[in-house]
Image (cartoon, grey):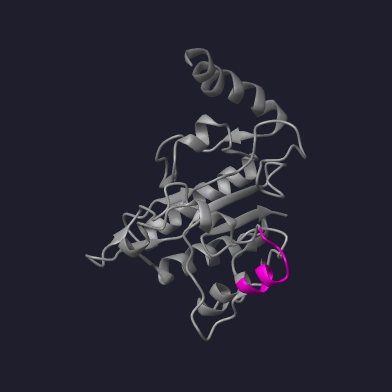
């Protein structure tokens, strides 16, 4: 275990940097942090320098707009080898992608919180309302069994303790959408409509992926 930790946090970053990837912060840095440290222990927190800078800049802007806010990142990429799959993701394989958690409020107090209902950030979804497009049902009916798979293996016990913060989440998505370095943003279609997100960078990811009403996918051009 000691050898693994030394390799992960001392040797791997030194090798990855000349190859064009750097680790995202291990702890809260400039208002950006991993939601779960396991992401860092497993070396799933590597991005290109451009994406690193963009993520830190946006996290700082979020804190300026909503004091006390810290942006939580989820999976990013492995430190080496383009096209090496970051299971279960389809495209996190080149240092240009990062997943971010939604923003929430404490249901009991109504106060904003930097915590999330899911300990890994995935699997607890902001479900479509009755009058909204239900892409999850559509994709499942088409035979894409994996689309809602995470909701079946992640405990939903904490869901009632958190309320989706639409204002902060909208601002987070829009800030990334205005960056010239960003090429695509994936979020579930019903949330794009609900949050009135209009950038043409914000797209549907397709039924072959998994649900994106529990996180935001950001990628460079």
- Whether residue 178 is visible: no
**Looking at the image, which residue sits at the far bottom?**
131
Give the x, y percent position of residue 120: 47, 47
Q: Inspect the magenta stretch and tell me whether residue 140 lies in it.
A: yes
Give the residue displayed 66% in from the left and 68% down from the top: 140
Q: Is residue 54 left or right of residue 28?
A: right
Give the x, y percent position of residue 202: 64, 68
- 35 in relation to 151, above or below: above
Q: Inspect the magenta stretch and tell me whether residue 108 lies in it.
A: no
- Whether residue 63 is visible: yes
Give the residue displayed 66% in from the left and 27% down from the top: 16
The C terminus lies in which quarter of the figure?
A: bottom right
Magenta stretch in the rendered image: 137-145
Q: Is residue 193 left or right of residue 145?
A: left
Toward the viewer: 134 or 20?
A: 134
- 39 in relation to 142, above or below: above
Toward the viewer: 207 or 10?
A: 207
């Amino acid at each position: 275990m000691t050898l693994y930790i030394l390799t992960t946090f001392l040797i791997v970053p030194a090798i990855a940097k000349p190859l064009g990837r750097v680790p995202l912060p291990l702890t809260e840095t400039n208002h950006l942090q991993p939601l779960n440290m396991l992401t860092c222990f497993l070396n799933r927190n590597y991005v290109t320098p451009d994406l690193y800078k963009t993520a830190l800049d946006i996290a700082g802007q979020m804190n300026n707009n909503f004091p006390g806010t810290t942006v939580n990142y989820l999976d990013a990429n492995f430190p080496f080898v383009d096209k090496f799959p970051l299971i279960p993701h389809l495209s996190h394989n080149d240092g240009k992608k990062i997943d971010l958690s939604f923003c929430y409020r404490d249901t009991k107090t109504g106060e904003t919180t930097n915590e999330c209902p899911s300990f890994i950030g995935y699997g607890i979804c902001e479900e479509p309302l009755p009058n909204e497009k239900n892409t999850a049902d559509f994709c499942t009916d088409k035979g894409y069994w994996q689309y809602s798979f995470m909701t079946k293996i992640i405990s939903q016990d904490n869901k009632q303790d958190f309320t989706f913060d639409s204002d902060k989440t909208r601002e987070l998505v829009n800030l990334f959408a205005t960056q010239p370095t960003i090429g695509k943003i994936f979020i579930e279609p019903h949330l794009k409509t609900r949050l009135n997100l209009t950038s043409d960078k914000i797209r549907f990811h397709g039924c072959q992926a998994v649900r994106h009403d529990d996180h935001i996918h950001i990628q460079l051009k």
